[in-house]
């Protein structure tokens, strides 16, 4: 019996070893939980040093250390340049210029030779590696065409190691010997988006996402193979060799230090915490980082120095802003965070993006992690409810009903510059939940539809039943809605806009077995699975060639109001959705946690977006004066361009949209769980697998259970 048990044990161990062996018998790497590290809130360990001189050229993300100076590239309207930067004096000088070429990347040999990856502006060839000595004299030019790289010759990065030039394109890592002739030594297949760097001891490291895992690889130049050296559950967009750390890893939001020996990954800082955009880094003496990050998106910035500092001991705390959007925060919000952090170092805003937990197919994992953090006491200070698309963000409704959000009316009422009268009453009214305002919406769009007024009759008749009768009797209309948008998009937005006609959280009831919802499902069936996705600039032609009664549109810019009269002249009308009308769609939306210890600071940050001075940076203003300014500016530009005759009803349409917004009563509120109930069941109906009655009964049953669980 013992012999049998021993044999089974040996067999088990052998099977276990076999299961753990990959890539030439080496043990599969244990994945480092970089996602967990990314969530850590760390004190600022670096201070940004900004040179006195302003930026004159746009600096590229190409840096290389050459002795006691840093080489980098940049460009302006006159051409591209190779620079040398002295960290001691914080001064740069041009080594050489390239008026007819674009510089993609550079690398430096230990002997000080600079190799620049240059591409022709006329695309006459694949590019060249130009060798330049320390004084700026060209020592050689090696054409990439000579390497026979096949179709994949779009080289992105260049590195030098032990007398070899390494070129990284979208599909290949190519090793070549500089000189005449320029000779390829070998090439290896890589994944798109791969990045590489060379450590101080000449070791080439490549990072890439492969088979769903992000790994770092060491190049074995003798075997001409890539050997996996580390694995992470988070992808990195930049990697750079260091001295204090083996590598600096950048995930687009934060910079990390990594050490191979003990597999230590440490979050160093977030870019927003430093009040700058992300950029490439290179480490100089005293552990300083030279960085290509920018102070602003819209103006050139000189090289920045990130200097280590002692942790800030002043009173204050970090404000956490939570988002689940796979697209990240709007660039204007990011810019505002950087400016806030610069002016309020005691209360820096740290963005926690939960989308890192999603696998790209189901965003619920991000929202579940956010919920788990809230339940465990790790509660954000600010929530991002921006409806960038359906099924990617949590809804403000459940948060407000559970007492997780601050009512913002008291903050507006006591604000010395703001009052409720500043805002469209329709915007405030539509956003209210039980009389409170739980989200600040600096930018929104108006979800509506337009039609030929002579066909749809009076507003009192805009029901699904009446409008479908119009379609059935019309000599030209074959469908109720046009085919600009796909079925899932259309259905998701109609459900989000339907409010209490489908879901009443006050009473705990839902109405997915109603005639109203049946009409929605029936209409969705006529909408194509994939929309045309035509631009609004072609909509006038599309209307003329269409066989639809209503034309869905999401007016995110006030001038878009003119598309209706452009199509139908003075005989246009904005119908909205049948039976519910026009709907406010909160494209940018933020709420303050009722548990935050920094409520006043959160309000101080958010309120700026709805002040008179700031709010015109957004497309549709929630303020009456802001909207009027946008209308005046749009019409003035039309008149100055001489297009007022082409758009005789443009000003009228814009003013009509402003009036619709003033009288709005509904805001779109997407509930991800409701959508996950509706869409699979509705899809079965669209595929002919289930009757309409069975479909709505199933949805009603599942939605009722969900609502009961939430009450």
Image (tube, grey):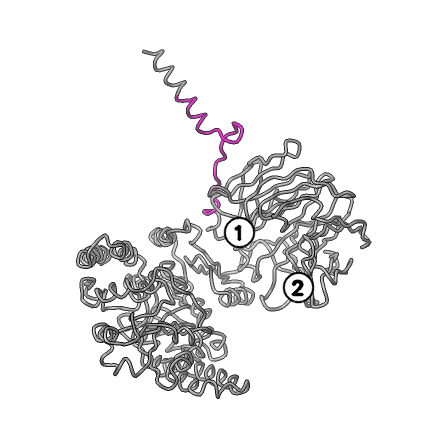
Residue at the (66%, 51%) spot, across then down? 282
Q: Residue furthest front?
A: 475
Residue 33 lies in magenta, yes or no? yes
> Left of 90 or right of it: where is 22?
left
Residue tagged by mark 2?
58
Vertical arrangement, residue 456 with respect to residue 333, above or below: below
Residue in the foreground of this view, choosing between 559 and 236: 559
Residue 692 drawn above or below residue 259: below
Mark 1 secondary-structure assignment:
loop
Q: Which mark is residue 428?
A: none
Q: Quadrant of residue 188?
A: top right
For the magenta stretch, what is the residue range? 12-36
Label 2 vs 1, first from the N-terminus: 2
Q: Estimate the x, y position of residue 594 in percent, counting from the top left.
A: 35, 63
Left or right: 22 as drawn, with respect to 590: right
Location of the N terminus by quadrant is: top left
Q: Residues within 10 Å of mark 1 (few under 14, many from 20)?
A: some
- Can you give x and y, in whole percent of width and height, for residue 422 in the image? 40, 82
> Residue 44 vs residue 291: left or right?
left
The picture places residue 553, in percent across and down from the top left corner, at 38, 72
Q: Which residue does the image show at 63% across and 31% down from the upper left?
A: 223
Marks 2 and 1, how far apart at CA: 22 Å
Q: Pick whichever, 218 or 437, lies toward us.
A: 218
Residue 142 visible: yes
Whether residue 425 is visible here, answered yes or no, is: no
Residue 666 picture quarter? bottom left
Look at the numbered disc 2 and give the secondary structure of its residue. strand
Which residue appears at 42% of the width and 86% of the height?
649
Q: Which residue is mark 1?
A: 251
Query: Which is closer to the viewer, label 2 or label 1?
Result: 2
């Amino acid at each position: 019996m013992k012999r049998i048990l021993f044999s089974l044990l040996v067999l088990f161990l052998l099977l276990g070893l076999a299961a753990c062996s990959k890539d030439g018998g080496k043990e599969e790497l244990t994945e480092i939980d970089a996602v967990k590290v990314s969530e850590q809130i760390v004190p600022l360990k670096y201070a940004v040093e900004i040179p006195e001189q302003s930026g004159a050229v746009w600096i590229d993300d190409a840096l290389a250390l050459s002795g006691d100076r840093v080489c980098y590239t940049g460009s302006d309207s006159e051409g591209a340049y190779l620079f040398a930067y002295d960290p001691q004096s914080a001064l740069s000088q041009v080594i050489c210029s390239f008026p007819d070429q674009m510089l993609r990347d550079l690398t430096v040999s230990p002997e000080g030779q600079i190799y620049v990856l240059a591409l022709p502006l006329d695309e006459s060839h694949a590019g060249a590696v130009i060798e330049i000595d320390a004084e700026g004299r060209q020592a050689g030019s090696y054409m990439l065409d000579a390497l026979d790289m096949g179709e994949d010759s779009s080289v992105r990065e260049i590195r030098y190691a032990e007398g070899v030039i390494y070129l990284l394109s979208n599909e290949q890592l190519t090793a070549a010997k500089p000189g005449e002739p320029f000779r390829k030594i070998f090439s290896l297949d890589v994944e798109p988006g791969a990045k590489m760097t060379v450590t101080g001891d000449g070791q080439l490291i490549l990072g890439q996402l492969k088979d769903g895992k992000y790994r770092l690889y060491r190049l074995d130049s003798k075997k001409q193979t890539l050997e996996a050296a580390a694995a992470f559950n988070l992808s990195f967009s930049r990697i750079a060799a260091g001295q204090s750390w083996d590598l600096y890893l950048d995930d687009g939001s934060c910079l990390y230090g990594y050490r191979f020996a003990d597999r230590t990954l440490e979050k160093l800082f977030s870019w927003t915490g430093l009040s700058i955009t992300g950029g490439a880094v290179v480490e100089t003496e005293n552990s300083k980082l030279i960085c290509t990050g920018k102070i602003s998106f819209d103006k050139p910035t000189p090289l920045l120095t990130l200097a280590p500092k002692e942790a800030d001991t002043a009173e204050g705390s970090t404000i956490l802003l939570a988002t689940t959007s796979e697209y990240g925060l709007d660039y204007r919000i990011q810019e505002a965070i950087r400016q806030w952090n610069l002016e309020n170092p005691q209360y820096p805003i740290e963005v926690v993006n939960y989308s890192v937990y999603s696998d790209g197919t189901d965003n619920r994992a991000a929202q579940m992690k956010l919920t788990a953090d809230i339940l465990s006491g790790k509660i954000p200070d600010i929530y991002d409810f921006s409806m960038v698309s359906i099924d990617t963000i949590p809804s403000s409704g459940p948060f407000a009903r559970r007492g997780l959000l601050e009512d913002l009316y008291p903050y507006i009422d006591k604000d010395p510059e703001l009052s409720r009268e500043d805002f469209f009453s329709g915007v405030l009214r539509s956003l209210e939940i039980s009389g409170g305002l739980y989200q600040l919406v600096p930018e929104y769009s108006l979800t509506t539809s337009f039609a030929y007024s002579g066909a749809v009759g009076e507003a009192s008749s805009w029901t699904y039943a009446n409008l479908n009768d119009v379609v059935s009797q019309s000599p030209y209309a074959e469908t109720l809605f046009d085919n600009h948008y796909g079925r899932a998009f259309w259905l998701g937005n109609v459900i989000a806009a339907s409010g209490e006609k489908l879901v009443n959280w006050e009473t705990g009831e839902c109405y997915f077995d109603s005639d109203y919802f049946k009409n929605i499902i029936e209409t969705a069936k006529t909408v194509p699975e994939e929309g045309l996705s035509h631009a609004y600039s072609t909509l006038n032609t599309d209307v003329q060639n269409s066989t639809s009664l209503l034309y869905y549109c999401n007016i995110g810019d006030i001038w878009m109001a003119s598309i209706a009269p452009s199509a139908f002249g003075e005989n246009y009308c904005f119908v909205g959705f049948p039976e519910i009308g026009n709907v406010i769609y909160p494209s940018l939306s933020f709420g303050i946690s009722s548990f935050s210890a920094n409520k006043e600071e959160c309000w101080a940050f958010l309120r700026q977006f709805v002040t008179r001075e700031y709010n015109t940076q957004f497309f549709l203003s929630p303020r009456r004066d802001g909207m009027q300014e946008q209308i005046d500016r749009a019409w003035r530009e039309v008149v100055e361009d001489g297009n007022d005759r082409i758009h005789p009803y443009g000003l009228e349409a814009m003013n009509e949209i402003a009036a619709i917004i003033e009288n709005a009563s509904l805001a779109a509120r997407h509930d991800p769980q409701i959508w996950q109930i509706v869409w699979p069941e509705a899809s079965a109906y669209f595929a002919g697998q289930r009757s309409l009655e069975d479909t709505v009964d199933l949805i009603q049953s599942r939605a009722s259970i969900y609502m009961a669980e939430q009450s």
